Image (cartoon, grey):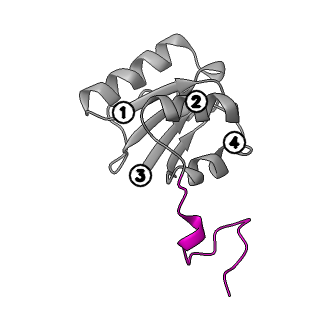
Amino acid sequence: MNAMLVGADTLGNIPDVLNAYGISIHRHVSGRNSAHQRKPDRLPAGTDLLILFTDFLGHNVMKHFRQLASSENIRFIACRRSVCALKQSLTGVGLSERTQCGNCRHACPGKPRRP
């Protein structure tokens, strides 16, 4: 699943949390750069989920991105930029962390390799 993130200058541990849910960051817009403040007329192709970090965005920007997601039938969540708030929001829309890592052969970061 590909997600577009709007808000937050730095992401910190957010990419690791999203990876645990099987979500990759398709695009990140901080919103602080003047080029990012221009309102796009659509979300990037291939976006499956829109994540809005509310403590870094104005109401009009959030409203615009929510309307874009709704018009394109893309799920969106709005939460604060914290790991706990993000996990709670992802669980609230029906997503869960992947638990099959014991049988997986992929070498994910922080996971011990199988012999």
* Residue ID for mark 1: 75
Kindly report which numbered mark, 2 or 4, lies closer to the viewer in this rendering: 2
Identify the residue at image location x=54%, y=73%. Answer: 104
Q: Is residue 105 above or below residue 8?
A: below
Q: CA distance from mark 3 to mark 1?
A: 11 Å
Q: CA distance from mark 2 to mark 1?
A: 15 Å
- Which residues make up the magenta segment? 98-115
Q: Does the magenta portion include 99?
A: yes
Q: Is residue 7 visible?
A: no
Image x and y of residue 84, in percent: 68, 31
* Residue ID for mark 4: 11
Image x and y of residue 12, in percent: 74, 44
Kindly report which numbered mark, 3 or 4, lies closer to the viewer in this rendering: 3
Check residue 88 in the rendering and tell me which mark sits there, or answer none: 2
Check residue 1 in the rendering and tell me which mark sits there, or answer none: 3
Q: Amino acid at mark 2?
A: Gln
Viewer-proximal residue among 107 and 12: 107
Q: Residues within 10 Å of mark 1 (few under 14, many from 20)?
A: some
**SS for tag 2?**
helix
Q: Are marks 3 and 4 in contact (CB under 8 Å)?
A: no
**SS for tag 1?**
strand
Locate residue 17 relative to residue 73 in the image: left or right: right
Q: Are marks 2 and 1 in contact (CB under 8 Å)?
A: no
Check residue 34 in the rendering and tell me which mark sits there, or answer none: none
Q: Amino acid at mark 1?
A: Arg
